[in-house]
Amino acid sequence: MTSGNKLSPTITGTRRAILEHLLGTDANAVTLANHLRINISAIRSHLDVLEVAGLVSSRREPAARGRPKRLYTLTPLALTLFPQKNAHFISALFQAIERSLDTKTINALIGHTVKALWQQLLPEKPSGSLRDRLAAITQALNIAGSYASVKQEQGAFIIVIRNFIFREAFSTFSTTINSRINVQFLRELQRMLGPVWVEWTDTPTVGDHLRRIRVTPRKEQT
């Protein structure tokens, strides 16, 4: 799959306006030209670039009069460029949970939720050496858009997460909920990695993009 960074030159200006219009409905070149008030030849040129980039696909649709028209639609790749904003809904849900449930039940619910999230990202527990398991973990995090990587540092491994999966929602969660999610996140990570110690190397703050987790082997790993 092409990365967002590689695609960014193709989605500015008119090309982004085309994609934004196609979010709401499929359209042909004539409709897009009329909507954006741009020459039809220019619109077709932009659509060709977007189609090569894998951001739009096209199909022929019969017309009431004349030749069939080529109808353009967004691809799944293009939809990833317009992420949905779910943080406020999640925040409202957890506020209701805090008001309605006791501490033990809340802890159990968060534990099940974080575990279910990891199971979706990584259905099978990773195997192989610690490096292999860390590679599987970072790949799973990247599927969720976390831009994670691993580096070795003084006998330990550091997982660097550049876009923490809960970052946006954390800005609306209570401190208590944030703390519980952080704890459960590390517990699940430790469960999947095996005989290691895991810890945050930083203190979570609202809106943090960058997070680091230290992974220290409990015994010699190969």
Image (spheres, rainbow, N blue to C red):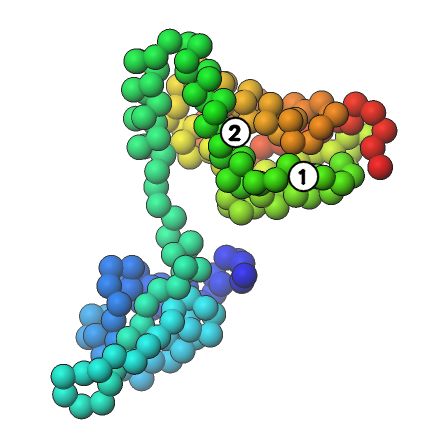
Whether residue 106 is situated above or below residue 11 in the rendered picture: above
Q: In the image shown, does 12 or 160 lie closer to the viewer? A: 160
Q: Amino acid at mark 1?
A: Pro
Horizontal side, residue 151 vs residue 123: left or right = right
Horizontal side, residue 156 vs residue 18: left or right = right
Estimate the x, y position of residue 118 in percent, counting from the top left. 54, 35
Q: In the image shown, does 143 or 45 lie closer to the viewer? A: 143
Q: Residue 97: which numbered mark, if any?
A: none
Q: Quadrant of residue 91?
A: top left
The residue that label 2 is drawn on is 115
Q: Earlier in the sequence, mark 1 or mark 2?
A: 2
Say few, some or many: other residues with alpha carbon within 10 Å of mark 2 (under 14 / 14 to 19 / 20 or more): some
Q: Quarter of the image for the C terminus: give it.
A: top right
Q: Residue at x 59, y 27 (%)?
A: 188
Horizontal side, residue 3 vs residue 90: left or right = right
Residue at the limit of the structure toward the bottom, as seen here: 66
Estimate the x, y position of residue 136 in percent, counting from the top left. 66, 43
Q: Quadrant of residue 25?
A: bottom left
